[in-house]
Amino acid sequence: MSFSKEKIKKTLENAKIKNMIRGVIFATIYIITTIVIPFLTFSWVMSLEIEGVDLELYQDRYNQIIFFVLAFGLLISGTAFFAYSSPSQSIRRGVFSLIQIILNCFYLWSYKFSGALELELVLVDMGVVTIDLAQMILTYMGIYFLVVILKTYDLVDFIVNRNKIKYERGKKR
Amino acid sequence: MRYSRIARLIMRIFLLLLASTMSLVSFLGGYSALLILGDEKNIDLNVDMTGNMLNTNDTTFELKIGFKFDNKGYFDLEDLKIELELSMVYEYFNYSGDGKNKPIGVSLYEGKKTFKTVENGEKLKGSISIERADLEITDAIASDIYNHIDPRKDIIFMGDRIAISGKYSLGLISFNVEIEDYEIESFKIS
Amino acid sequence: MFFQLENSPFWQAIADIMSFILNVFRPIVQPIGTVLVLIINFLLNFFPSENITIYVVIFCVLVGSAIFVNCKWPGDVYLSVYKKEGDKSSEVKEKKPSIVEYLDKKAEKKPEAKFPEEIEATNDSEEEEPNL
């Protein structure tokens, strides 16, 4: 094995570094999916064209949407970093994963307050198109609630089987 | 693997299936909108008038607003409803006595109609028929307009408000299109 | 345009399957969502909605505490023997040696390297004849 590969392998065997790398990777993924992509999407929606007709999203609605996306995106990314930099199947990972999923529900529903659930697009010189996504979001919320139950189950499992998890972790090494 | 992990894995697969379903439905709903709106042949509106609206003795008068909708998308279009507020704009001949005409708007009709579910791949051909009895203008107003209208100019039928609403993507997405001050058709008075 | 928008039978089949799945589970999932929404609507009133600073501060606190906690307790402590619940007397907790400790131990086993002069000096001192 070459010297650099051996060095990388030894570095990754160090649990602290492995945890931090995993935390950074997942935090980055969450920052991209909860902040960057929605930000770019709403900026793009600001001026759209369908069949030669311009659509406009109101500026104040846009500012509200961006605020909530940024605020909850930061919270979700922070908890994701904590959760994923924790050892696998540890209690603290369970706790922060549960908090993260609950924050995801807030993130999703805060789109309603920013007006993104009821998109109003102005057809210039013609009228208004309103798209109501409330039913879709309610269904998503129901699915999220089931995920919350799943994460709670995980947490209880990590607490109850704590010694068995530590033993299995040792066996893998 | 612990039994608790197996139960968790099953639950996770189920939730992943549900979330993927929702994502795919959202994507296909958006794609369907592009399929329908991308081709102007899929939505068609036309107005046909028989008889003379301003002649109170003419019993053959009928204003027919027909439309065609081709559901080229992947889902059924449910609860389709059209609300219409029609008005008419005509040129009042020599309104202030100085030889100049004045365009006058008169509210004609206000009504709504619901349609059956349009399944994917189906074409809907519907119409709203407006007869003399449905008009908001009285015979007296119609006679007054007939006496003062400039016959050289067209009568313009305006959609003061045309609202089309419905549900798509298994009822998950509701849309409402409101068009205001839309010139539908113009006619010469006979 | 690079592609022609058209209705594909493959995606239609996918849409039909998705429709069936959703129609089965929606009556269960949507009411749950409605209840969750009521709870969240209430709790969202407690989140500040004008100042982004507090959220940035919370993010920094979370990241900082994660770095501290997960470096201090990285989860490399494990059990070498696992007994079922109730029999904890023979639990042995053994920490896996870190790379540094492993290298130190390896170094201890190796004999110290000696320069050639030292070896000669040692040999010379051994051959010195006793003063009679």
Image (cartoon, coloured by chain):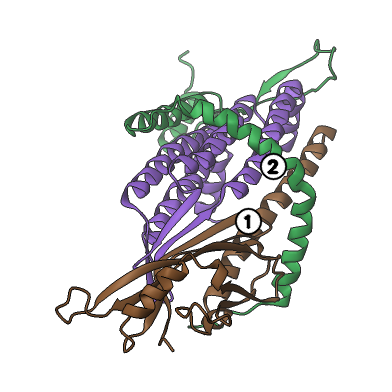
State which quadrant residue A171 falls in: top right
Left or right: B182 in relation to C51: right
Q: Colour of chain C?
A: green
Dot 2, crowdedness within 10 Å: few (<14), some or many (≥20)? many
Left or right: B14 in relation to A104: right
Subunit of label 2? C
* Residue named by callout 1: B23
What residue is shown at x 73% (from left), y 76% (from top)?
Answer: C9
The vertical placement of C82 against A98, above or below, is: above
Q: Amino acid at mark 2?
A: Gln
Residue situated in front as seen by the camera: A28 or C110: A28
Local secondary structure at mark 2: helix
Q: Colour of chain A?
A: purple
- Alpha carbon separation for disc pair 1 and 2: 16 Å
Q: Position of residue B156 (x, y in %)?
A: 39, 78
Q: Residue B164, can we see it?
A: no
Q: Residue C126, can we see it?
A: yes
Residue situated in front as seen by the camera: A161 or A111: A111
Q: Amino acid at mark 1?
A: Ser
Q: In the orientation shown, which residue stands out farthest toward the left?
A: B98
Q: Position of residue B146 (x, y in %)?
A: 38, 79
Left or right: A117 in relation to C20: left
Left or right: B127 in relation to C17: left
What residue is shown at x 72% (from left), y 42% (from top)?
Answer: C29
What residue is shown at x 71% (from left), y 50% (from top)?
Answer: B18
Residue C30 got which mark? 2
Q: Colour of chain B?
A: brown
Q: Position of residue C100 (x, y in %)?
A: 52, 31
From the image, state whether disc 1 or disc 2 is nearer to you: 2
State which quadrant residue A146 falls in: top right
Local secondary structure at mark 1: helix
